[in-house]
Image: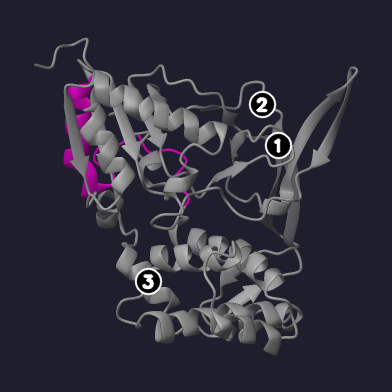
Amino acid sequence: MTTKDTPISFLIGSGFSKPAGYPLASEINACFVGLKEGDISIDSSGAAWLNSGNPTPNDWMRISDCQFIARLLNHYCNAVVTPETFHYESFYDWYKGIQNGEVADRKVERIASELEDDIADPMLNFNLFFNQLLAQLLRRWYPEVSLDRGLPRSHAKFLDLVAELGRSYVLHFHSLNHDLFFESLRSTVAMTRQFADGFSDLGSCYFGKFRDVEETDTGRDSYSYTVRLPRFVDKYESRFNLYKLHGSVDQYTDQKGDETAFKGKRNIGVTDFIKELNEEGRLFYESLNCIYHPDFLAGISYKTSRYGLTPYYRAVFEHFRNNLESSASLIVIGYGFGDIKINSMISEHF
């Protein structure tokens, strides 16, 4: 029996975000089937995106990368599987297998050689670009302020449930989604001022260059300034706690340091991250220019191999197991039970 001292756990999948307009896996798959090189833009910084039919004048600079992406996807869709059975998670496992030398495909080698490149280089670049394309389909920055519990209307009943349960219980929300929809609910009346996601900007050494454009009487003026970014501190001490088990489209990992996870913000690009360092009392900034895409897990089997790879994932999965053991109730929304390791954790710990 659930008591007031017993927490309640939620497990949330992509079906949770669908009513708010976020894509399901089938809709993401459709974006990659039949993709042409002209549908992709890559700038000199390494930023990649689906251009919706609006290519940039400088796309020719990375045309070989765009060609490799389109040809690799086309080969997989038509020779390895069929366009009707394409799934981006299975594709992710396949190309990771080629990159790691676990899968051999002579056609992929020929595609690379036709572009006058060694197979290792385009596969490495493909990994950087494909993650960005995936993130683009899921990244929607949530409103800064929304105090009306009925917004978004699609999830009003869910927020009523959260508000009611939150009067008596601590709630643990474990999300398998990369999108930011659940974060948009943190400022509603149901959860405001009682929400934790394990990140804090207090004392963070991570910063970003915020860039924007302002309309003035004389035209458009661009401006920028430095803002502090939240980093993962592994503290979940609120009434409502969110654990992003598969990472997030606004989450990055410091590859130059101790693999600390930190969050980006709207209008801050991946080339705008900087880290504050202290050497014998002297403070200075260092560019984190080795980061090209958010840190989130994809692939059916590949993502499960990374569950304990970094401090962030080790921590959130330890919380997941502990929360399952201490919770008397588990509420599952929008998850199809397709992750073998997640299912095993539920069986073992709940």
- State which tag comes first along the sequence, 3 or 1: 3
Q: What amino acid is at disc 2?
A: Ser
Residue visible at 42% across and 86% down? Answer: 79
Q: Callout 1: helix, strand or loop?
A: strand
Q: How many angstroms separate mark 2 from mark 1 (CA)? A: 8 Å
Cβ–Cβ under 8 Å for marks 2 and 3? no
Please name the residue that numbered disc 2 is placed on: 204
Answer with the quarter of the image where residue 55 lies.
bottom right
Q: Position of residue 104 (x, y in %)?
A: 54, 74
State whether residue 308 is above or below residue 292.
above
Mark nearer the viewer, 3 or 1: 3
Quadrant into which the C terminus falls:
top left
State whether residue 113 is above or below residue 288.
below
Q: What amino acid is at disc 1?
A: Phe
Judge whether residue 54 can be spotted in this image. Answer: no
Residue furthest out toward the bottom = 114
For this rendering, which residue is in front, 245 or 142? 245
Please name the residue that numbered disc 3 is placed on: 29
Q: How many angstroms separate mark 3 from mark 1 (CA)? A: 34 Å
Which disc, if any, is residue 30? none
Which residues are the magenta region? 141-166
Q: Callout 2: helix, strand or loop?
A: loop
Residue visible at 13% across and 17% down? Answer: 2
Mark nearer the viewer, 2 or 3: 3
Q: Position of residue 138 (x, y in %)?
A: 44, 58
Q: Is residue 349 magenta?
A: no
Cβ–Cβ under 8 Å for marks 2 and 1? yes
Q: Left or right: 291 with respect to 276?
A: left
